[in-house]
Image: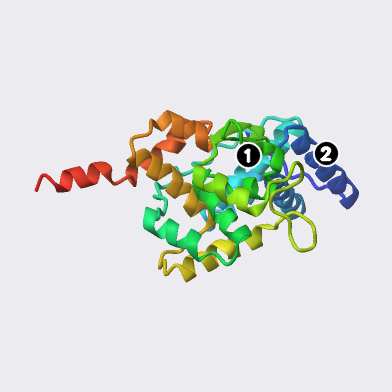
């Protein structure tokens, strides 16, 4: 199917972008996805190009950027313009990039080297609960059930609630920190929610002080959580549930970095 180039006035473009934002919210896509779609569609509407010409202009960019542009246009045509989007561009499969994993010793050194108890807790939530960065920002006291020793994540990615265990070390640290009945666990000096940059800096600073030479990010601790569980014999489907992965294939990447089998092979020589 070929597309005619349609010119939209600025007023029409504003209207279409407004409708796009509404459709994204109705489907409860993440704010990041919404911003990405709006930015790409704005560029497309002002480009005066057909969808194929516009997508070809992205061909020299990264695979993920190309995919974002493709799915933004597909969503826009199908849900805003109410037309079929029949472009069939050969989207290359994502290359298998193995996650960076820390040793248990490196994680423990990071926790011990954290500046203060609040920073220590940030690192511990990322590792001992396998949380994502945004999940740490949004964790609230009512989410933590000390009696049942679980954490009930209600503000998880994709609105998929899940339950993870409350590790003994994390529970003890929270007790020292001071348990509250309501509100967010992590509150900034200004009284608001921690921003992403703060958590990233806490992790970066802790890894540097711990003498870890790897490029550690908050997600590195989540990778380490999953890999260490797998190496200790946990069933991969339980790990999938703890991580909140929709597809088991996403969790299976940790089988490529777990070193239990690799060590066993080395012992054969």
Q: Identify the element where label 2 is drawn.
A: helix
Who comes first in sequence, dot 2 or dot 1? 2
* Cα–Cα gap, marks 2 and 1: 24 Å
Residue 144 point in image, percent of width and height: 64, 38
Where 205 falls versus 118 (above or below)? below
Could you tell whether 187 is left or right of 91 in the image? right
- The residue shown at (77%, 37%) is 25
Instruction: Report how many numbered discs are placed on residues in the image.
Output: 2
Where 133 falls versus 200 (above or below)? above
Q: Is residue 63 visible?
A: no
What label does residue 2 carry, if any? none
What label does residue 157 carry, if any? 1
Q: Residues within 10 Å of mark 2 (few under 14, many from 20)?
A: some
Residue 230 point in image, percent of width and height: 37, 39
Q: Nearer the viewer, mark 2 or mark 1?
A: 1
- The residue shown at (40%, 40%) is 229
Q: Which residue is mark 2?
A: 19
**Render colour scheme:** rainbow
Return the residue found at the far right.
11
- Foreground pick, 146 / 21: 146
Residues marked 2 and 1 touching at CB (< 8 Å):
no
Dividing the picture into quadrants, the one containing residue 213 is bottom left
């Amino acid at each position: 199917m070929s597309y005619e180039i349609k010119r939209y006035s600025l007023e029409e473009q504003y209207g279409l972008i407004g409708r796009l934002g509404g459709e994204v919210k109705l489907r409860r896509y993440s704010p990041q996805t919404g911003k990405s779609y709006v930015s790409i569609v704005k560029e497309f509407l002002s480009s005066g190009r057909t969808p194929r010409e516009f997508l070809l202009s992205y061909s020299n960019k990264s695979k993920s950027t190309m995919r974002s542009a493709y799915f933004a246009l597909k969503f826009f045509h199908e849900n805003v313009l109410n037309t079929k989007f029949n472009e069939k561009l050969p989207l290359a499969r994502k290359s298998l990039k193995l996650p960076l994993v820390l040793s248990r010793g490196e994680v423990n050194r990071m926790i011990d080297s954290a500046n203060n108890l609040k920073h220590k807790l940030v690192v511990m939530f990322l590792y001992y609960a396998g949380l994502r960065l945004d999940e740490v920002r949004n964790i609230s006291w009512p989410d933590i059930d000390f009696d049942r020793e679980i954490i009930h994540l209600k503000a998880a990615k994709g609105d998929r609630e899940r339950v993870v265990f409350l590790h003994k070390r994390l529970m003890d640290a929270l007790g020292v920190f001071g348990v509250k009945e309501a509100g967010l666990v992590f509150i900034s000096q200004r009284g608001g929610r921690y921003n992403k940059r703060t958590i990233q800096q806490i992790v970066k600073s802790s890894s540097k002080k711990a003498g870890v030479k790897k490029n550690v990010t908050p997600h590195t601790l989540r990778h380490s959580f999953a890999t260490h569980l797998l190496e200790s014999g946990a069933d991969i489907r339980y790990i999938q549930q703890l991580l909140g992965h929709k597809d088991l294939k996403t969790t299976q990447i940790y089988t490529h970095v777990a070193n239990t089998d690799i060590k066993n092979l080395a012992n054969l020589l």
